[in-house]
Amino acid sequence: MALDHQTHMVDGRKRASLIIDPPDGRVPPLTADAQRRNAARRLATTSDQTSREDDPGFEGPEAYNDPEIRPLAERCLVGFSSTSGPPVLPTYFYNNLHQIVQTPATVMILTEMVHDARVVRIGGTHPPATIKKWLGDSIGRWDGDTLVVETTNFTDNTRFMGSTDNLKVTERFTRVDARTLRYQFTVEDPATWTKPWTAEYTWPLTNDLMYEYACHEGNYAMGNILRGARLKERDEAAKRTKQ
């Protein structure tokens, strides 16, 4: 495993925040509706981690009764912490590589963590809003040498930071030199944030290899997670019996 040290660099300098708008480098405040919505969805901890944006919205001991109500990343369906996006966020640790394959009609972005592949259709149109996709629907266009990608049609199962399924993400990919790609994104969801916000960081070219992230639905860990819940229930029942 190789640790990454450049994912927090922009123009060769460290930044305290990826956010460039607002200028204070902070995500804008949540709307009152988003505060109420997120408070209602607040979960107890799952496994040994606190709940994340991809948690299923289920609380209590029953959360371990069915693999389909475990978090999506825990089930290895999509990458956690928006590693494949959109927007694409770095893990600041490892498996941050992306492979870009370009054809005249499409651009494919493969993310090492957790093997998610996005297909951007150049010059296409979005399907009706009723058609939702795990990673949204991405349409690309060229603005000079910059690839601009607009993504909508998110499923409510893959909320980004508690957003709604009306989220829109606009990404800009610009090659600033032979070994550097500037990645910039703007997040818009009036039902979640009081105003849009924009962030950026660089994707440096590397000769490192992209490794298989062998996480898959139905993995062995999932069975053990559910077995562990059953063992905990048995132990707690035994303690109550002794009392």
Image (spheres, helix red, strand yellow):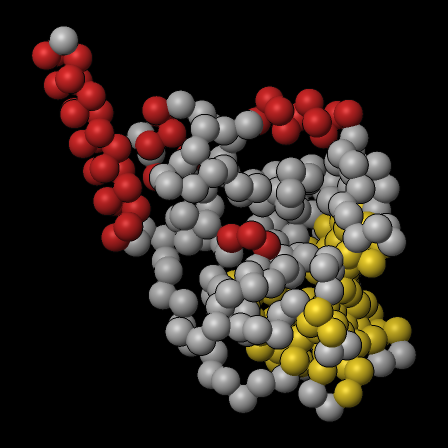
Quadrant (top left/top right/bottom left/bottom right) for the C terminus: top left
Look at 31% across and 30% down and name the residue there: 65
Give how far across and how far down residue 134 sits, in percent.
Answer: 57, 50
Look at 40% across and 23% down and name the residue there: 60
Q: How many discs mark residues in the rendered view? A: 0
Residue farthest top in this picture = 243
Is residue 155 something one can see in this rendering? no
As drawn, is 130 to the left or to the right of 198?
A: left
Query: Quadrant location of residue 142?
Result: bottom right
As drawn, is 160 to the left or to the right of 125?
A: left
Residue farthest left in this picture = 242
Give how far across and how far down residue 53 sits, in percent.
Answer: 57, 41
Give how far across and how far down residue 144 sits, in percent.
Answer: 89, 79
Look at 84% across and 47% down and name the residue there: 196
As drawn, is 114 to the left or to the right of 166?
A: left
* 176 w.r.t. 120: above or below: below
Give how far across and how far down residue 5 sits, in percent.
Answer: 57, 73
Nearest to the observer: residue 104 or residue 145: 145
Nearest to the observer: residue 118 or residue 225: 225
Nearest to the observer: residue 102 or residue 229: 229
* 51 w.r.t. 123: above or below: above
Quadrant (top left/top right/bottom left/bottom right) for the N terminus: bottom left
Query: Quadrant location of residue 120?
Result: bottom right
Look at 53% across and 41% down and name the residue there: 52
As drawn, is 174 to the left or to the right of 95?
A: right
Is residue 34 something one can see in this rendering? yes
* 20 w.r.t. 192: above or below: below
